[in-house]
Amino acid sequence: MDSFKSNEEIINYDIATVYGKLSNPETFKQLVENEKLPADMKERMAGVEFTSDSISFTANPVGKVCLQIVEREEPSKIVMSATTFPIPFKAIINLTDMGDGRTQLLVEFCIELNIMLRAMAAKPLGDGVKKMGQMLAMLPYNML
């Protein structure tokens, strides 16, 4: 099993708030519709679909990807499994209470890659998990 991790990111909201929002993706619909959200952030989230248990988006070149929440461990862990991806993988969001209303976030992708796929996919997966961590860290949790 191959593992790709984001950088450790610090979020300036308490762990209960962060977990509450991330464990229910449907709350992100409100964010996309919020008039105060910067245009560039709205553009990034265009085409992303949210339900209470899943997030779906299009990723080139693989097409539509759906991540379904398969495990919630309040307040520190959310596990999502890809249901429409050519290779099964999990995205694990780990949260740690830093005190003073701050939360540490670490995202990990776990995927089984053969040698040939590992050579082609390691860099894009590594970059993708880092971008996901950065994106989750900069969300305006007070607007959700």
Image (tube, rainbow, N blue to C red):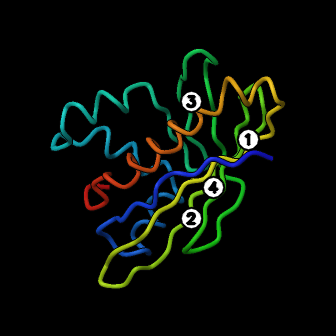
The residue carrying mark 4 is: 92
The residue lying furthest to the left in this view is 36
Give, as a three-letter code, the residue at label 1: Phe
**On screen, 121 above or below 4?**
above
Give, as a three-letter code, the residue at label 2: Asn
Q: Which sits earlier in the primary sequence, circle 2 or circle 3? A: 2
Of tags 2 and 3, the one toward the viewer is: 3
Of tags 3 and 1, the one toward the viewer is: 3
The residue carrying mark 1 is: 89
Q: Can you give x and y, in whole percent of width and height, for residue 106 in the image?
A: 51, 60
**C-alpha span from label 4 to label 2:** 6 Å
Instruction: Describe residue 143's horizontal placement relative to residue 55 as left or right.
Output: left
Residue at screen point 52% across, 36% down = 128
The residue lying furthest to the right in this view is 114
Q: Secondary structure at mark 4?
A: strand
**C-alpha span from label 2 to label 3:** 21 Å
**C-alpha span from label 3 to label 1:** 14 Å
